[in-house]
Image (tube, rainbow, N blue to C red):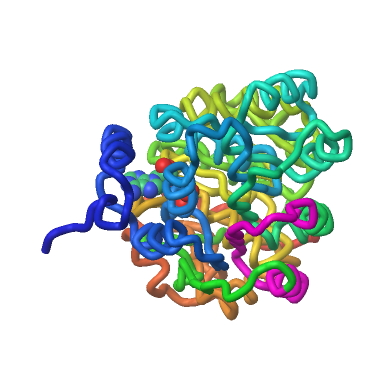
Amino acid sequence: MIEENFTDLGINDELAAILKTKGFEHPTPIQKQTIPLILDGKDLIGQAETGSGKTAACAIPLVQQVDKSINDIQTLILTPTRELALQYLDEVSSFGTPYGVTPFVIYGGFNKGIHLAKLRSGVQILVATPGRLIDIIYNHYLTLENLKTMVIDEADEMLKIGFIEDVDFIKSCIVQKHQTLLFSATMPPPIKRLAGKYMKDAVHIKLNVDQSGPSSLTHYVIHTDSRAKDRQLSMLLAQKEIAQAIVFCNTRTRVKSLYKSLQDKFSGADYLHGGMEQNLRTRIMDKFRAKKIKFIITTDVMARGIDVRSVSHIINYDFPKTSESYVHRTGRTARLGKEGTAISLITRSDKEILKEVSEKYGINPVAFPGSDAQAGDSGSRQRRASGGSAEGRGPRPRRDYPRKTQRTQ
Ligand code: AMP
């Protein structure tokens, strides 16, 4: 069978050649669906998770659509977090800059003077978090009169962190006819209303039909209690199989205290949370991407969209408070067909959410090899665990998990 190329989808030879140098030879299934529609000027609602080439599915046609002779913002991409904004910029720049278009990113917490200077020098694709953008629009530093396309990424996350009114406001500032692309993993009523208000005849596509995530992702649980968590985590982090791991905690305070207790044992550990100064967050993400950090301890700030392909393990030191968060956290590994492992430390109070993970997403984690047999409570060995034989995964943890449970939070 002959595989499709980007040129078959309407991407020009110059951009396709640049994509090839970046290792993008064939479009992913998502890209096959969206690229022709976007080039055709259609409004689009994509129910999508990242990890399947979603960013490029949008960014490739948007780069091609830029009129290089107009030195003004033609595409606006809104993302809920700074990390996602920076990641989006990286992807757009990697082929947009050699193609000759100028992308830029603005977000809160960074020097506004530098943002303004760059905006004045001419930016064609702007990636932004809503707060800083509104600040700049309010102060008349920016007009969007040449804007042709607006992308609202991770709309449900915007809603969750209270940005949806800001998005609504920004949208209302664009008076001319333009194309809108809205991406959201779920479609709660406020997002539907927003879409209904601004998008006419949008094509609705489900980009990732299997919500349970890739089959190359293996889900494990270890039933435990809060006193045993640190010891179990140390054992897990000592596994040779780990290329890079993200360790999730539920609060910033817990991130810091866990880091303190681990920093002497594991030299490649660091931490990141939303309360840290932005420059530091960016530096830590850069180090993580460059593999200078092996274990990153974090909150849900890293749960959405973050794409670091060498992440082999997700460890839920604290089990998430929602089943959606579980899916997002574990989606940071097993990206683009790679193998990945998710291991969750479960206390009694987490069992409800674990059940919801199974009922809503069909994910049934199995007991981590060698851990307490009661882990089988959470579900039998099923399809989700078939990514590798349990025995093949790391050393067998000692059978000394305390059975007495106690509440962690
Ligand atoms: P995303 O779903 O946007 O987070 O993308 C996941 C990863 O896939 C990113 O590292 C992209 O650079 C990469 N990627 C996207 N499209 C392709 C493609 N057609 N070929 C190879 N890699 C790709």
* Residue drawn at point x = 63 percent, y = 28 percent: 270
Residue 154 point in image, percent of width and height = 64, 56
Query: As rendered, which of 286 and 60 lies closer to the eye?
Result: 60
Quadrant of the image for the C terminus? bottom right
Check the image and report above or below for 121 versus 399. Answer: above
The number of numbered discs placed on residues in the rendered structure image is 0
Residue 198 point in image, percent of width and height = 70, 67
Query: As rendered, which of 147 and 352 lies closer to the eye?
Result: 147
Which image quarter: residue 100? top left
Residue 98 painted magenta: no
* Residue drawn at point x = 61 percent, y = 61 percent: 182
Residue 342 point in image, percent of width and height = 50, 54
Query: As rendered, which of 250 and 240 lies closer to the eye?
Result: 250
Quadrant of the image for the N terminus? bottom left
Residue 194 painted magenta: yes
Residue 249 in view (yes/no): yes
Residue stretch in magenta: 171-196
Determine the residue located farthest toward the right in the rendered image.
139
Determine the residue located farthest toward the left in the rendered image.
1
